[in-house]
Image (cartoon, grey):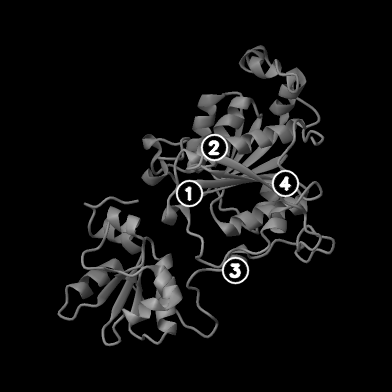
């Protein structure tokens, strides 16, 4: 069942705009009135990455009048296989700046509002309040819960998407009309149990599949047409080329949108979602070494054992000579501790240092005393010691 349009009053269109949007105006469910309401609409896209790229481009092409974009990151070479709003010429450029330029190339009639910040509890309500709806293209759990809670508190819908490897999910969360994100996912997964795209990889074109659905849902909500995905979770398997739909319902006991909410203000979402390898109050700072200190130790007369906790595919791209592969999962299960020497120093590395920090913490808890985490992981090694290998 369709909902009332989020945008009630439109903005008059110029003659060039009417020509540009003529194929929209011909649609009975859009027409000139609907296109004018799109021109008056304000949509916030959180994340100018894989999902944000198609969403930004198609919302701009559709004539959404004002598009806000939130991202504190800069364009990296590893982004370009999926983040089609950016190009080689944009490497090192703030993603919001690159996105703004791309949107204006697609449609000069669109106003772009840049938010070069990391969305958090101190700014989320203020940023989101100025928009009709939010398109959530983030890739981490703290920001997903933050966006959800802020939208519930502001009474705004948000169109959510998620991708990993060959799979994607998309839905519309809107308290009062259907479930919110917390109704369906009340607790975040255990820290480190779900790899990020940087760790697990993602099929680049999957972003187009999910991001275009998000754009469609946003336009439907703005105009009040069709049946939005409220109460439905769409699941896409790119390898099977299948789309499955699950019915999801609001939880009356939801802590943020339920009958008696317990979350009435934004919280510390990093703490809520947990940090892999984080110390307990009883534990001290994690022992660490820089990549240069690691290299010096490996070249010494009594070299330590260097452990690589990454996956096979990552190691095939780049590796540190002499490193022994012991996957992080083996540390979590305890199997790794049978492979670690008790009479030799152990250094542990991953891609950037987060997974190895967890492994180092687990080794210390298992009784190994001479263990340290390699700060910055193999990316620091490639940038500072061996630039001949590719980054990823």
Disc number at residue 302? Answer: none
Labels 1 and 3 touching (C-beta < 8 A): no
Question: Is label 1 in contact with label 2 (beta carbons under 8 Å)?
Answer: no
Query: Label 4 belongs to which residue?
Result: 129
Q: Position of residue 333 (x, y in %)?
A: 45, 75
Between the C-alphas of marks 2 and 4, the distance is 28 Å
Q: Which mark is residue 73?
A: 1
The Cα–Cα distance between marks 3 and 2, rounded to whole angstroms, is 32 Å
Q: Position of residue 166 (x, y in %)?
A: 48, 46
Identify the mark nearer the N-term, 4 or 3: 4
Query: How far apart, in angstroms, are the residues tagged by discs 1 and 2?
Result: 23 Å
Please determine whether, in this image, residue 199 is positioned above or below residue 24.
below
In the rendered structure, the answer to whether residue 209 lies left or right of residue 155 reads left
Count of marks placed on residues:
4
- Counting residues from the start of the chain, the first of labels 2 and 4 encountered is 4
Mark 1–mark 4 Cα distance, whole angstroms, equals: 22 Å
Which numbered dot is residue 271? 3
Q: Could you tell me how far apart the alpha carbons at marks 4 and 3 are, in whole angstroms?
A: 24 Å
Q: Nearer the viewer, mark 4 or mark 3?
A: 3
- Return the disc, 1 or 2, that comes first in the chain's sequence: 1
How far separated are the C-alphas under marks 1 and 3? 22 Å
Label 1: few (<14), some (14–19) or many (≥20) C-alpha neighbours in 10 Å: some
Query: Of tags 1 and 2, which is closer to the observer?
Result: 2
Q: Are marks 3 and 2 in contact (CB under 8 Å)?
A: no
Q: Is residue 101 above or below residue 309?
A: above
Q: As rendered, which of 75 and 187 lies closer to the eye?
A: 187
Locate residue 14: give its quadrant.
top right
Judge the density around disc 2: few (<14), some (14-19), many (≥20) Cα neighbours within 10 Å: some
């Amino acid at each position: 069942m369709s909902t009332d349009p989020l945008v009630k009053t439109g903005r008059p269109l110029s003659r060039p705009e009417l020509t540009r949007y003529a194929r929209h105006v011909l649609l009975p469910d859009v027409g000139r009135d609907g296109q004018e309401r799109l021109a008056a609409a304000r949509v916030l896209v959180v994340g100018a990455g894989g999902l944000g790229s198609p969403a930004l481009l198609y919302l701009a092409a559709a004539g959404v009048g004002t598009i806000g974009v939130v991202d504190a990151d800069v364009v990296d070479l590893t982004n370009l296989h999926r983040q089609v709003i950016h190009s080689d010429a944009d490497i090192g450029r703030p993603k919001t700046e690159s996105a703004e330029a791309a949107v204006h190339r697609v449609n000069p009639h669109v106003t772009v509002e840049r938010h070069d910040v990391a969305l958090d509890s101190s700014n989320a309500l203020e940023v989101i309040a100025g928009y009709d709806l939010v398109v959530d293209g983030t890739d981490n759990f703290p920001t997903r819960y933050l966006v959800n809670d802020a939208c519930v508190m502001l009474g705004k819908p948000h169109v959510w998407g998620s991708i990993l490897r060959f799979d994607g999910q998309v839905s519309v969360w809107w308290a009062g009309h259907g479930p919110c994100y917390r109704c369906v996912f009340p607790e975040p997964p255990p820290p480190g149990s779900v790899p990020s795209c940087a760790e697990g990889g993602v099929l680049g074109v999957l972003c187009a599949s999910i991001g275009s659905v998000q754009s469609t849902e946003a336009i439907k909500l703005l105009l009040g047409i069709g049946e939005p995905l409220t109460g439905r979770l769409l699941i896409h398997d790119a390898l099977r080329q299948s789309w499955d739909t699950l019915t999801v319902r609001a939880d009356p006991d939801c802590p943020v949108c339920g009958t008696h909410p317990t979350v009435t203000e934004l919280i510390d979402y990093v703490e809520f979602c947990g940090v892999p390898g984080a110390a307990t109050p009883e534990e001290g700072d994690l022992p660490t070494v820089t990549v240069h200190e690691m290299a010096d130790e490996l070249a010494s007369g009594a070299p330590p054992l260097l452990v690589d906790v990454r996956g096979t595919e990552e190691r095939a791209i780049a590796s540190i000579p002499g490193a022994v592969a012991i996957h992080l999962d083996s540390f979590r299960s305890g199997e790794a501790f049978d492979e670690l020497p008790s009479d030799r120093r152990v250094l542990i590395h991953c891609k950037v240092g987060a997974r190895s920090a967890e492994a180092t913490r687990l080794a210390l808890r298992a009784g190994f005393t001479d263990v340290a985490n390699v700060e910055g992981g193999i990316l620091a090694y490639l940038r500072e010691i061996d630039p001949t290998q590719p980054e990823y």
